[in-house]
Image (spheres, grey):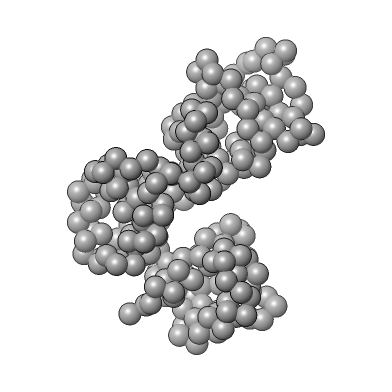
Amino acid sequence: MATLTIENYVKTIYQLVLDNDGQPAATGQVADALDVSPGTVTSMLKTLSTSGLAAYRPYEGVVLSDSGEALALRVLRRHRLIELFLQNTLELTWDEVHDEAENMEHAVSDLLIDRIDDYLGHPETDPHGDPIPKSDGTIAMGSNTSLAELAPGDRFRISRVTRQDAEFLRELSRIGLQLQSTGVVTGKHVTANSIAFFMGETSIELTLDAASEVLVDVEDPTTVSQEDVSV
């Protein structure tokens, strides 16, 4: 049986490799993500490699094996279903569920998770828009287009938020940004590191760094007045 530490490592490596477009996760990336020393990471990566959960090469990085990826998806399935269960049944907000799910994901059985999945009606995404792995280990990947990539005139629908620390999510809630919100980009100011858009009748501006953490589905283009558009 995998330990809590092993589960955290494979989940982290899975996400880092995904963020790296399939390239190995560097030791430093893993260390930063888990807030541990590079030496500690190197030791654990050797353990994961010996146990067949990962392939680790010094100076090149680490990728998961098929069994390691299967374990990572099981952990993600638990985490994301717990988040949605806490939101739907206990009415926790999207900035509250992540830390609670982190604490619970290692303690629940796959049987209980399958029952939660049944109870929730087999949802496809969690409160942040992350895809929920199915019980057979498959996962549907959604849009990889970020709000920061859009241009003035682009219409969009918010599909996912990849940065999930509580402070960031609370700020998004404060300005009225939530999943499935629709909008149109009215201005992009690269030198000022910002992007502006309308959601309904509300004008919102985000830094490009923040907007890069918000993934969207791009909808049919619309026309905006020239005075609203600046680059």
- Which residue is located at x 50 percent, y 49 percent? 165
Q: Is residue 8 above or below residue 55?
A: above
> Residue 197 appears in which quarter of the rendering?
top right
Residue 112 visible? The answer is yes
- Which residue is located at x 45 percent, y 85 percent? 51
**Residue 180 spot, x, y in % from top left:** 43, 32
**Residue 7 spot, x, y in % from top left:** 42, 71
Q: Is residue 218 above or below residue 201?
A: below
Q: Is residue 90 above or below residue 178?
A: below
Q: Nearer the viewer, residue 82 or 22?
A: 82
- Which residue is located at x 62 percent, y 60 percent? 20
Lateral position of residue 118 relative to residue 171, left or right: left
In the rendered image, the quadrant that contains the N terminus is bottom left
Lateral position of residue 91 relative to residue 26, left or right: left
Count of labels shown?
A: 0
Q: Nearer the viewer, residue 146 or 223?
A: 146
Q: Residue furthest right?
A: 191
**Residue 10 spot, x, y in % from top left:** 47, 70
Q: Is residue 45 above or below residue 198?
A: below
- Which residue is located at x 63 percent, y 16 percent? 223
Residue 220 visible? The answer is no
In the rendered image, the quadrant that contains the C terminus is top right
Q: Residue furthest bottom?
A: 50
**Residue 160 spot, x, y in % from top left:** 48, 42
Q: Residue furthest front?
A: 167
Q: Nearer the viewer, residue 171 or 10?
A: 171
